[in-house]
Image (cartoon, helix red, strand yellow):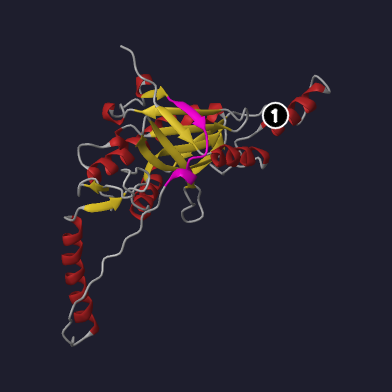
Amino acid sequence: ITFKMRQVQAEESIQRSFGELVQQRACAQVGLVVGKYAVGSRDLMLGLIKTPAQDGQEALLASSSGSSTGAAAPTNSSSNSKQGKKKGAGGGSGAGAAPQPAVSLALDTDWVVEHAAQVSRMLPGGLAILGLYVFCTEPSYQSVVAQLCAVLAAIASQCCQSQGEACSASSPLLLHADASSRKLSLRSFDAQDGVGKGGVAAGQLRMADLKFASSISSLVCLRCSHALDLALPTPASCSQLRQQLQDLGEEACQAVSCAVAVVADSTHSTGSGSSPPITIPPERAPP
């Protein structure tokens, strides 16, 4: 069985942002990848949104494997390992130069899923959450990849429930930026396979082709307004006015959701100077 490699085009600013994190020796971090599904033969990766801390605790915590404190620590430990080598090279005893333990990660999966749900509701129409990104070293990535895939499965389930059966979010993306080598690896997660009890099967993550180019300048933002001309009876209280506005708003939203959007296409000319309108069916119209 041959699988067609998924094509993804990412903004060049994303590559620069990871380079800045490496220069700053930033701690491990996780966040959302935002973009557009199926633009031609590729997906567009337009930006990253870091998952914020909750109650002062980051969504992705790094701790040494031998540590019981669970305190956050930088995953880019190249400078620490170099210092350890220098201390150990001076003599055979190596007093005070304990070996650097491996760094493992713990992910607050519930908070990341909740963050994705909140961001999804705030995104403008046409944009979607493509998946997750994680910035850490390769060993740390291996320690948390099963948790990341569990989050991807939950995010895909949320998106498909809102989009229906024809859902492009059933295969979210996982972007890993190596904090040591600066290598970027993109994988596609098949959420339909689910997550096994013992972790994630190797076949669920498949490599995707990642290329960098600017695409935001070619996107078009459409804005529209819907005027309401309503007569409201004089309410007896503020709560009654609020209820009246809510009822009228629900009626207006229902009418708009059944409407058909018609957009004049200025990129295709018919030769007579006029352009045929593009009709967007209600089920495909962005919210």
Q: Tell me residue 146's x, y (percent).
A: 40, 30
- Rendering quarter of residue 102: top right
Which residue does the numbered mark 1 point to in the structure image? Answer: 81
Can residue 60 be seen here? Answer: yes
For the magenta stretch, what is the residue range? 208-219
> Relative to 239, is 27 on the left or the right?
right
259 relative to 202, above or below: below
State the count of labels.
1
Give yes or no for residue 215 being in the magenta stretch. yes
Q: Tell me residue 22's x, y (percent).
A: 64, 37
Give yes or no for residue 269 being in the magenta stretch. no
- Rendering quarter of residue 269: top left
Can residue 94 be seen here? Answer: no
The kind of residue on which mark 1 rests is Ser
* Residue closer to the observer: 44 or 224: 224
* Residue closer to the observer: 168 or 18: 168
Q: Quadrant of the N terminus?
A: top left
**What residue occupies the far front of the structure in this picture?**
272
* Residue closer to the observer: 129 or 141: 129
Secondary element type, mark 1 = helix
- Rendering quarter of residue 86: top right
Q: Residue at x 70, y 29 (%)?
A: 81
207 relative to 121, above or below: above
> Relative to 39, is 23 on the left or the right?
right
Q: Tell me residue 160's x, y (percent).
A: 25, 40
Q: Tell me residue 257's x, y (percent).
A: 19, 56
Q: Residue at x 65, y 29 (%)?
A: 100
